Amino acid sequence: MKGLLSKAGSLIYNHSKLTLVIIAVLTVIFGLGLPQIQMNTGNSMFVSSGSKIAKDSVTYQKQFGNDVFIVDLHQPNGESTVNPTTFKKVKQFADKANQIKGIKSTTDVSSVLNGELHASSAGNMLGSSSQSGTQSAMMAQLSSRQKKQLQNQMTKSLTASQQKRLSAYTLSILTNTQKMKMAQASQSSKGSTTQSSTALTKLLQPKQQAVVQAYTQKLLTASQKQAVAATMLKMLPDVQNMNAGLLKQLIYFDNGRVPSAMAQLLPQNGRHLLISLTTTANTDMNMNNTQYKKIKHLLKDAGLTTGHYRASVAGSPAIAGTVGKQMTNSMTIMLLAAVVIMVIILLLVFPVRRRLFPLLFVLVGMVWTFGIMGWLGIEITMATMATLPILIGLGTDFGVQFLNRYEEEYKKNHQDSRAAVTTTAAHSGMAVGIASVVMILSFLMMLISKAPMLKFFGVTLAIGVLMGYVVEFSLTFALVSILDQRKNFRQTAKLNKNKSWLNNVLANYSKWIMKHAGVITVVGVLLGIAGFFFESQISIETDLTKMIPQSLPALKANKKIIKEVGSTTNLTYLVKSDDVRSKDNLAAINQFGQQVKSKYSKDVLDVTSLPETLSGSQNKLSQTKLNQQVDAIPSVVQQTLVSKNHQYSAITFKIDPDLKSDQALKLMNRITKDAKNVSGDVTISPAGSTGMMLKGINNMTANHGLIIIAGLLTIFVVLLLVYRHFHYAIYPLLPIIIVLGLSPMTLKLLGISYNPLTISLSSLILGIGTEFTILVLERYIEERRKGQENEGAIETALGSVGQAITVSGLTVIGGFITLTFVNFPVLQSFGFITVLDTAYALISTLTILPAIIYLLRPRKPKSDQKPTKN
């Protein structure tokens, strides 16, 4: 392998300019993939598309829509929003909002009321005596012409007996003048009852007409009242055009309170008005962002954000849409901060010529990495965002290793650039190559995770490490070959032929370590073992709203709505059947909903389902009547409860907003278990965004231990195959295992929780930490093969490679520190913990590794030692 790498270095040296041209062309090709990168903050980050809940959610979204924007409208003075002016503005907004691309439907109190009043069943409701106050208010809404028409219809519907009684009553309230005119009309009508009734109606004054109408309604039978009510409803305008009196009667008929059926749309007894906008299936973050902007614009146009009105937009698509811009801004900040910090580190602690080359080359590597992601369709998530500073640090690390060894060989070989390139390519290329393979395999262990986001995270890191190695290897050797072939005396004068201060410090440090190797190893092992006991005691933060910028307007609006109007968190369940309208199925759905509400009353605040919406007892109705009732449900409500083919229905449980995500997941699992016992020809299963999110959080933390074990075993097997020596395969792992124990112990002491992203750090530390140990080990083996004694080999390895990995470690730490500059709490936490773990890995490599090598050194006389060949 070293021979191949040496030939590769020689080939680059001989064709250095061609190498640069090839790299430039490939950079342009990969760069064309950058605009194709998509960002994803949806639930597909957390749950595999092949899982049952994901498939059910796709079905649910096709039938009932996707996530929901919530507009909270109120007046600062606390007055009721129930008035014609507000309803007209809301109607104007809703009509235009329905035209926004990706909006399936809008729901507000006016659309619901219009649907109910125009439904065929509305006549039944208003025909009952309990709604007499509402009927009076409706009569007040009608014009005189409409009232006369209604009176004529009522009169025509009367039986002979009813008409006789009505005529007698009407005559009793006539004035003498009216009676004389009536007598004349009766003579001219020649005894026609209809003509006499019409004449009588024309004689009545408005007040008399009102009295007669009231008396007529008392005479009507139930069926006659329903017919009259239906006629009256056709005469009424839409609710936004009604007078204030009728509007308030329709909404506040329950003793001045908003009825429970409308409470979700008019919280706090009408002081708030909520408008929900349901998105279509497969809407992405970019579309959510466009929708969010258009909704804000339409609210302004409708006059709902100025004057007496305040409106805020919330809901998960609002958060997803606005968080995308924050992600882009954060990536830009991270990139700039990482570059600045690494420039400072390289200038201060890397005393070689062209010390900034590794950082410049890594930017090319970033174009390659993210360009390939664009071509392959790998989406950017909150996790893959974190790969940017990681890969900048790792790529710079590779370049530092190559440049550090090249400078060393260039001095040794009397400024022979060819010899320095081929030697460095063989030795450092091999060491960094082994470390890169180990890192790639460690990162690919994340494919064991159940969460697609972590799988993408691991794949992105693996691609980035490979691209970083290729780019740094090619560009470093190509450029130093060109520059040092010119015999640039200014550059030669900069060549420091003495060992650096850091080199000397590390060489002396290695002597101290060997003198106290036993104590250092015992202390390290004990701390590592103790640390593992804290692993299970560290809590995991699962509230996703705490992981994104708290300054997001949509997130603030969400919190405000929860505080002012109650929970907006719903668990949705998909009901499947040949026909969900069947009597048995409706009974089963209703029983299940009530059982859940009763059984989990502390956590489940309300339930919405098809049988809950239907009026009366379904058991007493025929199947035909039930079907008619379902069809009579206003379309704006119907489309949220039952599919057009009647094979699907939705059950929605409003849950306590204070429930943490892990508690909500347990609740969902219990409800899902209960759903398996539901009778009838129905299948009930969780679906929708909330269920996907909760399942996804569980996926993020699943297989954590398996990923660590698989990573350790993979690294051990790879090193054993490479070195064919048990000690050399185990040396790099022991310091990192100690770090894996120190990390949770430190978090516990600092009171820091894991989150779904930081819990994946084990694979990251395995990759980065093992790279450090492999580089030191590889140089130690090289020095031993040259004939150096064990102590000398340790001192040389730590003094030479130790300088490079110290610089590398600091650059990686510098990369991670940039995560603290972003306003994503999840990334800030990730950055802090990773800085901590990387520092531990660096210290452990420079301290524990040489101590272990020294303790396990060969005890035979030097003349009997046979160093293992690669």
Image (cartoon, rainbow, N blue to C red):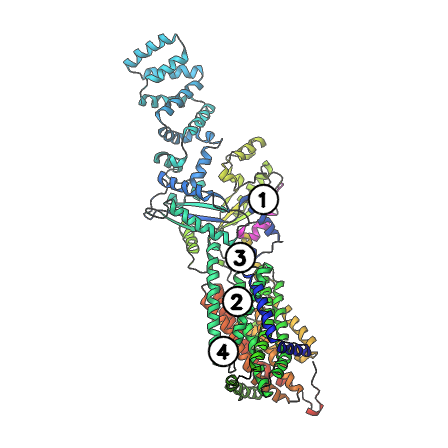
Q: Position of residue 604 (x, y in %)?
A: 50, 49
Could you give the CA–CA distance between mark 4 and mark 1, rounded to whole angstroms? 61 Å
- Residue 676 included in the magenta stretch of the image: yes
Q: Nearer the viewer, mark 4 or mark 1?
A: 4
- Mark 2 sits on what residue? 388
Q: Position of residue 345 (x, y in %)?
A: 48, 77
Q: Position of residue 620 (x, y in %)?
A: 55, 32
The residue positioned 42% from the left and 45% from the top of the image is 274
Q: What residue type is labelled 4?
A: Leu
- Mark 4 sits on what residue? 346
User: Circle 4 sits in a helix, a strand or a loop, which is it?
Assistant: helix
Q: Which mark is residue 40?
A: 3
Q: How dense is the environment of label 3, judged by Cα within 10 Å: few (below 14), some, or many (20 and up)?
A: some
Could you give the CA–CA distance between mark 1 and mark 2, rounded to whole angstroms? 43 Å
Residue stretch rendered in magenta on the structure: 668-690
Q: Residue 575 carries which label?
A: 1
Q: Position of residue 863 (x, y in %)?
A: 70, 92
Could you give the CA–CA distance between mark 3 and mark 1, rounded to whole angstroms? 28 Å
Could you give the CA–CA distance between mark 4 and mark 3, rounded to whole angstroms? 35 Å
Number of labels in the image equals 4
User: Disc 4 or 1, which lies upstream in sequence?
Assistant: 4
From the image, which quarter does the C terminus lie in?
bottom right
The reply to whether the C-beta atoms of the residues labelled 4 and 3 are less than 8 Å apart is no
